[in-house]
Amino acid sequence: MDETDASAIAFGTDGWRATLSEFTEPRVRMVGQAVASYLDSETIDGPVAVGYDARETSPDFASAIADVLAANGRDVVLPQRDCPTPVLAWTVAAGDYAGGVMLTASHNPPEYNGVKFLPGDGAPALPSVTDAVVSRLAEPEGDDADAGATEERDLVGPYLDHATSLVDGSLDGLTVAYDAMHGSGRGVTDALLERAGADVVRLRCEQDATFGGGAPEPEAERVPELIDRVTEGDADLGVVNDGDADRIGVVTPDRGYLDPNHFLAAMYAFLLDDEDRRGDVVRTVSTSSLVDRVAEAHGEDVHETAVGFKWVAQAMAEHDALLGGEESGGFGLGSHLRNKDGVLFALLAAAAEAARSFDERVDALAAQHGEIHQDRVSVDCPDDRKQAVLDALADELPETVAGVAVARVNDVDGFKVILADDTWLLMRPSGTEPKLRIYAEAPSGDRVDALLEAGETLVEPLV
């Protein structure tokens, strides 16, 4: 294997991720050189913050990136320990940084690692930026004579100070069970909750570079102990972060693992209860329209984007939005950071729970806006067939789906078919796997199943 082969480096939906057989130090150094060359070409001054997650190889990869950046004349700031991606992103956005580089494979299993570049505003890099970085991939060429300085700083402390200031009141009397999944949220999310006065029950908050042998992804089937602590124990709320703590999952006593779509709508309603917090909401095309009904009831607007938080962040800037979210558990608060932040939203979730339980909030949403159910299925599709399937699908879209007339079609990301009864079916290519995703939303689970079956019937013959 030629470890200087740049063709193996591809920045996808959220940076470059690969197994450790491909994610090697020579290639990581090439990324460092590309970042340095990009910043120079754009005459973007300032130091670069380089963070890393809890994986065994991440500190060494971060050091390699730092060495290359310093050799190119950039001052570099490293954290004192592995840190959540949102901590690094906020540090970059709040300080005088040219940008940030984060070594993380997020929720992927331990045999993966990854790297993402964060521009100076801390938001996810748009394709125009990542394309410019990738076009500059090269072996390091820095001059040690003009090397920048590298230092370690406490990035977590200032972040916690800031995050604490965003929530009024105390969480005294609230018990929160927190599952770090052995990731970088340990000692950060739980510390933030304790600062605010909550009693915290810690689960998987010990460092383990293998994440206990699984993937640190916040899904119901991966957090049985957390669910038990809340539904069978004495915790008022459960919170889980993924490996780099940019995503969040929530558990309630009555519902168990809370649908992220319901969480987004409930959080938006909670934020709008504060008269000093007003603004639109941004969601991806695959995220529930329940939050749209909350926005309409409060006289606010909704902005729909393609899947990927980079598009959510871009729309948050364009519309000065209060909140942005996606159905996979990524949420951003506009006044704080235009990026996913599972640490801050753990605190906001606890504050919302202390004021009124999520179970009551979701019940109230259903009473006011009606029941909404959503699900998705996947259809295997090679990457080189995805565009052909979409092209064919454009000619195959029917006038009715599962017995209901098509009202309109949204093609911002694949095809979202909105029906006359306001239910919808979305068919889009996965950005990370050789699959097509089919989503559906309707007032009942049976209707969702019927829509998904109709979607599969449309898509499968085209693959």
Image (cartoon, rainbow, N blue to C red):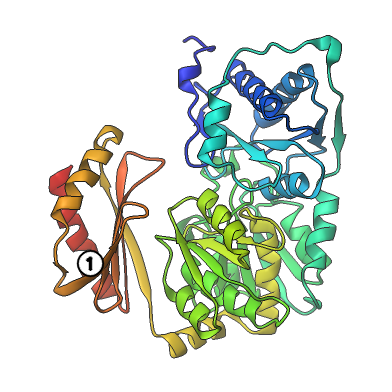
Amino acid type, callout 1: Leu
Whole-percent x, y for residue 71 in the image: 78, 16
Q: Does the image show residue 51?
A: no
Residue nearest the viewer, comparing 249 with 369: 369
Instruction: Name the residue carrying label 1.
Output: 451
Whole-percent x, y for residue 336 in the image: 72, 60
Quadrant of res 104? top right
The C terminus sits in image quarter: top left
Q: Does the image show residue 99?
A: yes
- For residue 72, side relative to residue 417 (left or right): right
Residue nearest the viewer, comparing 354 with 76: 76
Whole-percent x, y for residue 26 in the image: 60, 15
| Secondary structure of residue under mark 1 | helix
Is residue 90 depicted above or below 299 in this figure?
A: above
Residue nearest the viewer, comparing 29 with 375: 29
- For residue 159, side relative to residue 423 (left or right): right
- For residue 308, side relative to residue 341 (left or right): left
Is residue 233 depicted above or below 370 in this figure?
A: above
Q: Judge the density around disc 1: few (<14), some (14-19), many (≥20) Cα neighbours within 10 Å.
A: many
